[in-house]
Amino acid sequence: MRPDHPIVLITGASSGFGAAMARLLAAQGCHLALGARRVERVQALADELVMTHGIKAFAGAVDTRDTASVDAFVAAAAAALGGLHVLVANAGLASGTHKLWETPDEDLEAMLRTNVEGVVKTIRAGLPHLRRAGWGHIFFIGSTAGHQPYEGGSVYCASKHGVRAMAHSLRLELNGEQIRVTSVDPGMAETEFSEVRLKDSDRAKTVYQGVNPLQAKDVAECVRWCLALPDHVNIDEILVKCLDQASVHKLHRRT
Ligand code: NDP
Ligand code: 8X3
C-alpha cells in the first residue's frame, strides 16, 4: 500500500536534477536519502530540508561506481529512515565531446561506470527494500541521447541507450509486483552537466546561449507527477525537451 510519506533515495543529489528533486519531493512530504561524492553539499541540503519541511532526511557519501560504497550508502539510508520506497538512479555525467576513435579511456570508463554500472548497483542494492515495503517506484534518468545519437557523443549516447534498455528490461522483470518503473529522458537542461562535460565553465555557458533551456526543477516536476499518479498507472518514459529544442540537431538560438 502507498505510504503517506514515501521514503525516496536519490543519487547525484549534490547538484542539478537530484538537488531539485530533493527540494520538490521534500515539499510534498517525502522523506529523503540523498547521496553524492560531495557529501558536504548533500548534508547541507538535507539539513535545510529537514528545517524547512519537517521531513526526515539522511545524507551520505556515495560513489555509485563502487559496489561497496553503494551497498553501504543504501543500507545506512534504509536503516536511518526505516526502509525505502522510491529509488532515483540519477547520478551520471558526460565526459568530453570526443569522436569515438579519440575517446580517452578515462572518459570511457567514467561514463560507462557511472551511467550504466552505477545505475545497476544502485537499483540492485535498493530493490530488496522496495520489495519488503510492498510498494515502490524506480526512476531512471535517461536522456534524449538515449533516443537520438549525435556526433561527439558516442559513448554518452551508448550509456543513455543502455539506461533506456535497462528501464525496459526491469519493467518486464518486475511485472506483477507493485513497483513502477519510469525513465525520465530530458533534453538540454542548465545544470552543472556541461561544466563537468567540457571542464571549462566559460565554454559551458555557451551551450545555453540564446536558448531557454530546461531547468532542473522542470525535470523534478516530471518525477513528482509520475509518483503522484494512482498506483495502477505507470508512466514508462517521458521524453522532455525545452521548446527551443525541436530535436537533438535542431535548436532555436536567439542572437
Ligand atoms: P549535474 O552535474 O548538475 O549533477 C550530476 C550529479 O551526479 C551530481 O550530484 C554528482 O555529484 C553526481 N555524480 C556524478 N558521478 C557520481 C558518482 N560516481 N557517484 C555519485 N554521484 C555522482 O548534472 P545533471 O543534474 O544535469 O545530471 C543528472 C543526470 O541527468 C545525469 O545522469 C545526466 O546524464 C542526466 N541528464 C542531464 C541532462 C542535462 O542536459 N543537464 C539532460 C539529460 C540527462 P558528485 O559530483 O558530488 O558526486
Ligand atoms: C544531456 C543532454 O544533449 O547533452 O543528456 O546529450 S545532451
Image: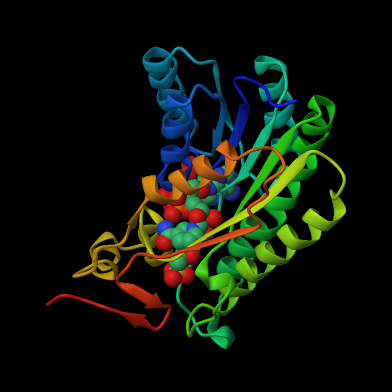
Q: Count every numbered label the image shows and give the total.
A: 0
Residue at image position (56%, 37%) is 228
Q: Quadrant of residue 128?
A: top right
Q: Position of residue 5 (x, y in %)?
A: 59, 20
Q: Is residue 190 above or below residue 253?
A: above
Nearest to the observer: residue 213 or residue 123: 213
| Image quarter hosting the C terminus | bottom left
Q: Quadrant of residue 187?
A: bottom left
Q: Residue furthest left?
A: 255
Q: Position of residue 221 (x, y in %)?
A: 44, 44
Q: Quadrant of residue 122?
A: top right
Q: Position of residue 16 (x, y in %)?
A: 41, 46
Residue at image position (61%, 60%) is 237
Nearest to the observer: residue 21 or residue 226: 226
122 left or right, relative to 21: right
Q: Is residue 170 above or below residue 143?
A: above
Q: Is residue 181 above or below residue 106?
A: above
Residue at image position (54%, 79%) is 148
Does residue 175 show up?
Answer: yes
Does residue 93 show up?
Answer: no
Residue at image position (27%, 59%) is 201
| Image quarter hosting the N terminus | top right
Nearest to the observer: residue 217 or residue 113: 217
